[in-house]
């Protein structure tokens, strides 16, 4: 699938974008989890490539990354896993730029993007790469038809949002609150403030960070989002399950719950639930 396929995943209705860490606890388990998420209604899969210093992630995902690294996950094994996936939705790789800089011998960034595209990766999210320093990666993504997804935080200035929109493709990831990832019990009012100040764009806006309940998904879409990203709520279920089959069932059920919340949304409504900073 191409970069355009990532954007197209948001065309029919607001998209659900679940995140799991590749190799947590094994590549075979991740294959089962990705299939279960798609069966539950996922439109795009955000598949984490573990890196030892995950600065954007909270304790839940940090622990999942540790489990995956301890089990032997590497970039090469990650790409093998993507090749083996048999799902009809785009796969977006979330990882950190240092890992790309250490890939291969010479021309590391383009080598990674080329190999990722050949394996079946349709997009990249690199949270530690400032848009001002993304020229090399942007050129590689354009050459190999891979979407480059940037994150907009509640503190991102309007000028910087414009620079991000000039270079982004696939979709724009809107950070729902300050801090790191992690499941929450409410929707931050920062979510609505962020969505309201974003300019009109041909790219969809997908909100993540803290999404864990059906009501969260509904409220975020009613706030103007084109999609919902959820990670820690799925990673928690993987950590809690005693068997891969149990975890897969839990992921399928939670994905279906969040997708139902998305479909509950009245996109012309104005009601907002109680929020916190």
Image (tube, rainbow, N blue to C red):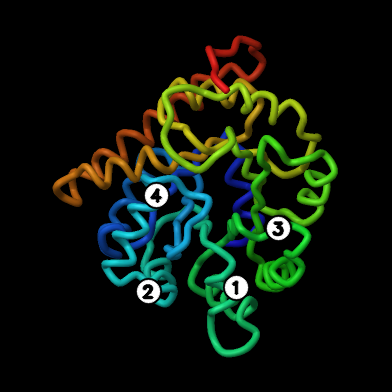
Instruction: State the residue position of label 4.
Output: 61
- Badge 1 or badge 2: first in the primary sequence: 2
From this view, report whether residue 31 is shown above or below residue 234: below
Q: Which mark is residue 113?
A: 1
Q: Earlier in the sequence, mark 2 or mark 3?
A: 2
Q: Position of residue 92 (x, y in %)?
A: 53, 57
Cα–Cα span, label 2 and label 4: 19 Å
Residue 78 placed where, x, y %? 41, 69
Question: Residue 124's x, y, as percent?
Answer: 58, 60
First reached walking from the N terminus: tag 1 or tag 3: 1
Query: What is the secondary structure assignment of the residue under circle 3?
Result: loop
Marking on residue 77: 2
> What residue sits right under mark 3 in the picture?
130
Labels 1 & 2 near each other (Cβ < 8 A): no
N-term-proximal mark, 3 vs 4: 4
> Disc 2, disc 3: CB below 8 Å?
no
Query: Given this view, does label 1 or label 3 mark the residue nearer the observer?
Result: 3
């Amino acid at each position: 699938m191409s970069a355009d396929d990532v954007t197209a995943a948001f065309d029919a209705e607001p998209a659900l974008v679940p995140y799991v860490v590749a190799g947590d606890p094994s590549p075979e388990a991740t294959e089962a989890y990705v299939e279960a998420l798609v069966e539950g209604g996922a439109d795009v899969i955000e598949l984490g490539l573990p890196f030892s210093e995950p600065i954007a992630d909270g304790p839940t995902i940090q622990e999942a990354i540790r489990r995956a690294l301890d089990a032997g996950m590497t970039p090469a094994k990650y790409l093998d896993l993507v090749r083996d996936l048999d799902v009809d939705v785009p796969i977006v790789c979330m990882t950190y730029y240092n890992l790309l800089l250490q890939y291969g011998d010479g021309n590391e960034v383009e080598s990674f993007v080329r190999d990722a595209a050949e394996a079946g990766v349709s997009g990249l999210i690199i949270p530690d790469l400032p848009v001002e320093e993304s020229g090399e990666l942007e050129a590689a993504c354009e050459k190999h038809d891979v979407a480059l997804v940037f994150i907009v935080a509640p503190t991102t200035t309007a000028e910087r949002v414009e620079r991000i929109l000039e270079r982004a493709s696939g979709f724009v990831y809107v950070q729902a609150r300050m801090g790191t990832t992690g499941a929450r019990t409410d929707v931050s009012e920062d979510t609505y403030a962020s969505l309201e100040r974003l300019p009109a764009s041909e790219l969809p806006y997908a909100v993540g960070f803290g999404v864990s309940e059906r009501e969260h998904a509904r409220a975020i879409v009613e706030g103007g989002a084109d999609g919902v990203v959820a990670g820690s709520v799925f990673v928690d279920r993987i950590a809690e399950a005693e068997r891969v089959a149990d975890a897969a069932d839990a992921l399928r059920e939670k994905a279906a719950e969040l997708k139902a919340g998305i479909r509950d949304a009245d996109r012309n409504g104005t009601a907002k639930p109680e929020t916190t900073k």
